[in-house]
Image (tube, coloured by chain):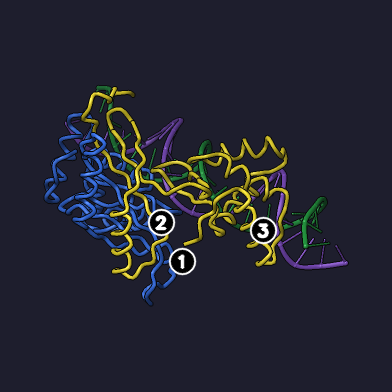
Chain colours: A yellow, B blue, C green, D purple
Amino acid sequence: MTQPLQSMSDALTALEHHVRQSGLRMTRQRKVIAEVIIELEGHVNIEQLYDEVRKRDKNIGYATLYRTIKLLREVGIVSSTQFGEGPARYESNVARDHHDHLVCLKCGKVIEFEDDVIEQRQIEIAERNNIKLTHHSLYLYGECTDGTCDKAE
Amino acid sequence: MTQPLQSMSDALTALEHHVRQSGLRMTRQRKVIAEVIIELEGHVNIEQLYDEVRKRDKNIGYATLYRTIKLLREVGIVSSTQFGEGPARYESNVARDHHDHLVCLKCGKVIEFEDDVIEQRQIEIAERNNIKLTHHSLYLYGECTDGTCDKAE
DNA sequence: GTGATTGCAAACTATTTGCAGCTCA
DNA sequence: TGAGCTGCAAATAGTTTGCAATCAC
C-alpha cells in the first residue's frame, strides 16, 4: 500500500506532492479539510467533518468536502468505511495503527486488537486468489464472560 | 444466533412462523421474494432481485421488495452488506456454510473462502478478552492482479 | 369485516455534477 | 493569464414513507 504517514506534516507533504505531480493545485480549502480529518480521530461522518471544517472556513460546502475526501483517499491519507446502513465514515491513516474490532453484543463494549497471525494469513489467502490486498474489515461478535458486562443499552 | 436453515422449505416455514407470531400476514409477494432471494445464490443487488421477482409477479415494486428484505433479515433468512460504494448486496443464509469474503474493488468480483487458521485464532483472541464468540464478519478488499479483472463498470 | 399489506408516487439521504465566478501558480 | 478550483443549486442513486386501494385471515 502506501508508506505510513507519521504526522500531520507528513500527510500535508504527501498531499502537496500528489497535487503537484498531477498538475492540480494546493488550495486553502484542501489544507483545512486535510487538517481537520487528521485532527478528528476515529471514524467520523461527513456531518462531523462539515461542522468542524466550517468552524475554520465558513464558506466550504459539501461539494468541496466530498471532492477533497476523494482526493485524500487517492493519496492514502484517508480511508472510508460503511458501517452497515447510513453514511460513510472517514478515518485518517496518519499515525494510527491498524486495528480490528471485538464487540460484546450484550454491553456494547468494543475492544480493538491486532493480530499478526491473522493479518499474515489474510495476505496469503488474497495472494492465492490473485488479489492484492489493500485493506480489510474484521469484526468479532460475542458476549462478555466475565463480570464486566453491564448489559448496557 | 439462529439455527441453520437447511432448505427453501425450512426458510419458508421460519418466515411463516415469524409472520404468524408477530401478527403479520403471509402474502403471495413475501413468498415470491423469499423464494427468489434463496434461489439466486451469492451476493445479488436490488436490481437483480427486482428483475427476477418481476418475472414471477409483474406488479411487485421496489417498496415491497425493500420492505420484505427487511423482514427476511429479521427472520435471519437474509444477510445484507455494503461493498464499499454503491447499492447493498443481499445473500440468503439458507443451506450455506459459513464463509468470509474477498472483494475486488475494481471489478466487484467476490470470492468466498473459509480458513481454519483464522477461525481458530479468532476464538483464541476472543477468549483472551473474556468474550464468547457468536459470529464474525471478515471482508478482505483488494484488486485483482490477474487478467480476470474486467474493470466492470 | 378489518387491520395488515401493497403499489404507486413522492420524500428523503448521501453523494455527485454543471456551471459561473474566483484563485493559485 | 488561464486552467484548475470553489460554492451554490440542481441532479442523481438508493432507499424509505404516506396513502388509498386491496387482500389475508
Callout 3, which amino acid? Answer: Glu
Residue B153, disc: 1
Judge from the rendering whether residue A79 lies leftward or rightward of residue B97; answer left or right: right
Q: Are marks 2 and 1 on the same chain?
A: no
Looking at the image, tell me whether mark 3 or mark 2 is earlier in sequence order. 3
Q: Indicate whether A149 appears above or below D9.
A: above
Mark 1 crowdedness (10 Å alpha carbons): few <14, some 14-19, many ≥20: few
Residue C15 point in image, percent of width and height? 54, 50
Residue B140 quadrant:
bottom left
Nearer-the-camera pick, A60 or B51 = A60
Callout 1, which amino acid? Answer: Glu
What chain does mark 2 sit on?
Answer: A
Residue B78, disc: none
The kind of secondary structure element at disc 2 is strand
- Please name the residue shown 26% across and 58% down the image: B42
The kind of secondary structure element at disc 1 is loop
Which residue in the protein does label 3 denote?
A16
Mark closer to the observer (2, 1) = 2
Residue A2 point in image, percent of width and height? 50, 61
Callout 2, which amino acid? Answer: His
What chain does mark 3 sit on?
Answer: A
The kind of secondary structure element at disc 3 is helix
Nearer-the-camera pick, B70 or B20 = B70
Q: Are marks 3 and 1 on the same chain?
A: no
- Please name the residue shown 30% across and 42% down the image: B68
In three-dimensional space, the C-alpha distance between marks 3 and 1, rounded to whole angstroms, equals: 30 Å
Q: Are marks 3 and 2 on the same chain?
A: yes
Judge from the rendering whether residue C19 lies leftward or rightward of residue A86; answer left or right: right
